[in-house]
Image (cartoon, rainbow, N blue to C red):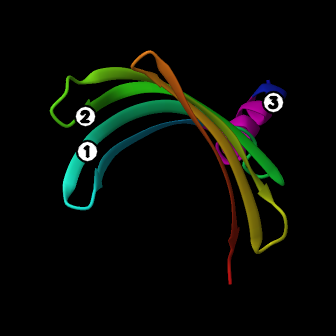
Amino acid sequence: MKSIIAASALLASGSAALAGPYVRGEVEFRGIDNDYGSTKTQARVGYEYDKSSKVAPYVEIGGGVIAPDRESSQGLFAVETGLKVNLTDKLTAKASAENLRYDDSNRWKVKLGAKYAF
């Protein structure tokens, strides 16, 4: 019985700090100069693995709507995966790959970045 209580306490206290599911939403407005182009609205569910380690991968899946100016709105399907690497106490690197499926096309992007904290 004591081992069950101890294991439950360990899981309850440590698991939230190590990894977990999340929900993310965003609205993006696009245009060129003064001309409005489109609005993209998305909602995603994701899972981030072991945030306490040097390397923290994540995966997301979701959907949304893209509404181009003067055109019909379309549904979209989104998948993204990536990771964050703590190179030092002050330097972090990030990499991600995303695919948006709408208008019978796969629109993909890959992002690489770094952040230095002073």
Is the residue marked by circle 2 packed among few (<14), some (14-19), or many (20+) residues within 10 Å?
Answer: some
Q: Position of residue 93 (x, y in %)?
A: 75, 60
Residue receiving disc 1: 37
Compute the Cα span from label 1 to label 2. 6 Å
Residue receiving disc 2: 68
Image quadrant containing the C terminus? bottom right
Evaluate whether residue 11 shows in this view. Answer: yes
Residue 15 lies in the magenta-colored region: yes
Contact check, label 1 and label 2, Cβ < 8 Å: yes
Q: Is residue 4 left or right of residue 67?
A: right
- Residue drawn at point x = 34 percent, y = 20 percent: 75
Q: Looking at the image, is 90 positioned above or below residue 31? A: below
User: Mark 2 is on which residue type?
Assistant: Pro
User: Mark 1 is on which residue type?
Assistant: Gly
Q: Secondary structure at mark 3?
A: helix
Q: Position of residue 110 (x, y in %)?
A: 65, 43
